[in-house]
Amino acid sequence: MLENLSRTLSALSRRTVAIGALTCALAVACLGGCTQTTASDGGSGASNAAVVADTGSAAAPAADDAQIAVQVVVDSSAADGSVTYDDTVELDEGATVLDAIKATGLELDIQDSDYGSFVNGIGGLASFDFGDSSGWGYDLNGETVMDSADVATVSDGDVLTWTYLV
């Protein structure tokens, strides 16, 4: 009987750990571009870097690669409206959401972590500038994407919208 109880508790513990891990993964994915920037990683494996996008790296056509056109929209009207962008960028086929925002030439603050790259700031407007829950999020063709910006890919004709949420 004690062995059956131990087996049942062990199965419940594994299930609880699995549910906890899934919940953490979903929370990180939902935060997308809304993670907090810190001065050091404190041993967490994360690194912070302010990036000024080089349009030549993401948008430069390669000789054998097919090119795609992606409309990029950046909207901070919910905050102060200081950052706006609406134009089409040319990218290599297979490019990511991160490649697309880099191709705009806007100043970016990107945090790399074990979960992927997260955009903390665009054009000098950063997460938490307008409160504890403010920050950048993106959608692709009007649909919320649950992947980090360096994982989600864009296709020809896509509309990528970065919105500052308050």
Image (cartoon, grey):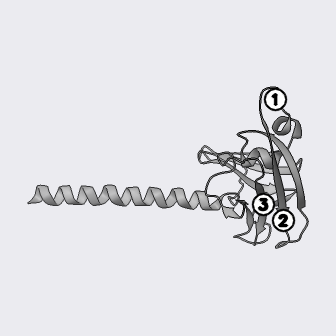
Q: Earlier in the sequence, mark 2 or mark 3?
A: 2
Kind of residue at badge 2 = Asp
Q: Is residue 2 left or right of residue 158?
A: left
In the rendered view, would you say 39 is above or below 166? above
Q: Secondary structure at mark 1?
A: loop
Does residue 116 appear anywhere in the picture? Answer: yes
Identify the residue under disc 3.
162
Kind of residue at badge 3 = Trp
- What is the quadrant of the N terminus in the image? bottom left
- What is the quadrant of the C terminus in the image? bottom right
In the rendered view, would you say 77 is above or below 4? below
- Mark whose residue sits in front, 1 or 3: 1
Q: Earlier in the sequence, mark 1 or mark 3?
A: 1
| 93 vs 29, nearest the viewer | 93
User: Residue 70: x, y in percent?
Assistant: 80, 50
Q: Secondary structure at mark 3?
A: strand
User: Residue 92: x, y in percent?
Assistant: 78, 37
Identify the residue under disc 1.
62
- Mark whose residue sits in front, 2 or 1: 1
Identify the residue under disc 2.
75
Kind of residue at badge 1 = Ala
Q: Secondary structure at mark 2?
A: strand
Disc 2, disc 1: CB below 8 Å?
Answer: no
| Residue at (82, 26) in percent of width and height | 63
* Count of numbered marks: 3
Disc 2, disc 3: CB below 8 Å?
Answer: yes
| Residue at (83, 59) in percent of width and height | 73
| Residue at (87, 57) in percent of width and height | 124
| Residue at (69, 70) in percent of width and height | 133
Does residue 40 appear anywhere in the picture? Answer: no
Q: Tell me if mark 2 has few (under 14), some (14-19) or many (20+) residues whose alpha carbon lies within 10 angstroms of its own.
A: some
Q: Is residue 116 left or right of residue 80?
A: left
